[in-house]
Image: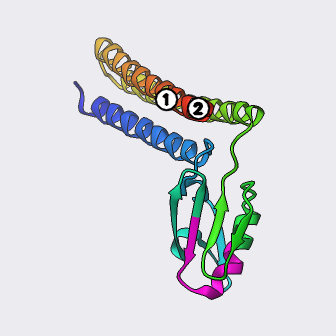
Amino acid sequence: MNEEVQIYLDEAKESMDKALAHLSYELGKIRAGKASTGMLEGVMVDYYGAPTPLNQVANVNTPDARTIIIQPWEKSVISAIERGIINANLGLAPTNDGIIIRLTVPPLTEERRRELVKKTKGEGENAKVSIRNIRRDVNAGIKDLQKDGLPEDMAKDAETKVQNITDKHIARVDELLVEKEKDIMTV
């Protein structure tokens, strides 16, 4: 196999792996009725005038399936953390006792579960589009190499390999979606 073709194949696999990692990250932010520290991943806190991720100003943990506890490292930051959670529009109401903040995750309604499944499928479709775009770009690169003298049979082999890599990644996207949908619909 031509060295340039192998570079294209390696880059395709690496890019598709990144698309899967991004999908996993996005699915982790979709709450499935259970408390998870990942739900607060995007929460920013105004920490002495600078927007700072929540996990850099407090410990976040889940003592049970319905509760998230946030323990700030400085008590003076409690109100900023509360504002950050409210501004993140997570649908969770923070309560504090002056030392820690508690978030109680309400059970999901059937309608909300269906909305979350739709959102999950949307994220999955975005990942599939991203993977297909990577395949298209790699195939275009292989065609360019073919114009520059790459033998046709090598180009066809490379395109077949790209398709196999694409198929494996799309199958993995489908697996992740099935897992997340099952997680969301489990009462």
SS label for mark 2: loop
Q: Position of residue 121 (x, y in %)?
A: 63, 29
Label 2, residues with CA under 10 Å away: few <14, some 14-19, many ≥20:
few
Quarter of the rendering occupied by the C terminus:
top right
Q: Is residue 70 magenta?
A: yes
Q: Position of residue 5 (x, y in %)?
A: 31, 29
Q: Position of residue 7 (x, y in %)?
A: 31, 36
Count numbered badges in the picture: 2
Which residue is at a point 31% across and 21% down the rendered structure image? 150
Which residue is at a point 53% across and 26% down the rendered structure image? 178
- Sequence-wise first label, 1 or 2: 1
Disc sitting over residue 134 in the figure: none
Query: Can you see residue 33?
Result: yes
The residue that label 1 is drawn on is 173
Q: Position of residue 132 (x, y in %)?
A: 52, 26
Q: Amino acid at mark 2?
A: Thr
Quarter of the rendering occupied by the N terminus:
top left
Which segment did they paint magenta?
69-81
The residue that label 2 is drawn on is 186
Could you say which is closer to the camera, residue 48 or residue 96?
A: 96
Q: Amino acid at mark 1?
A: Val
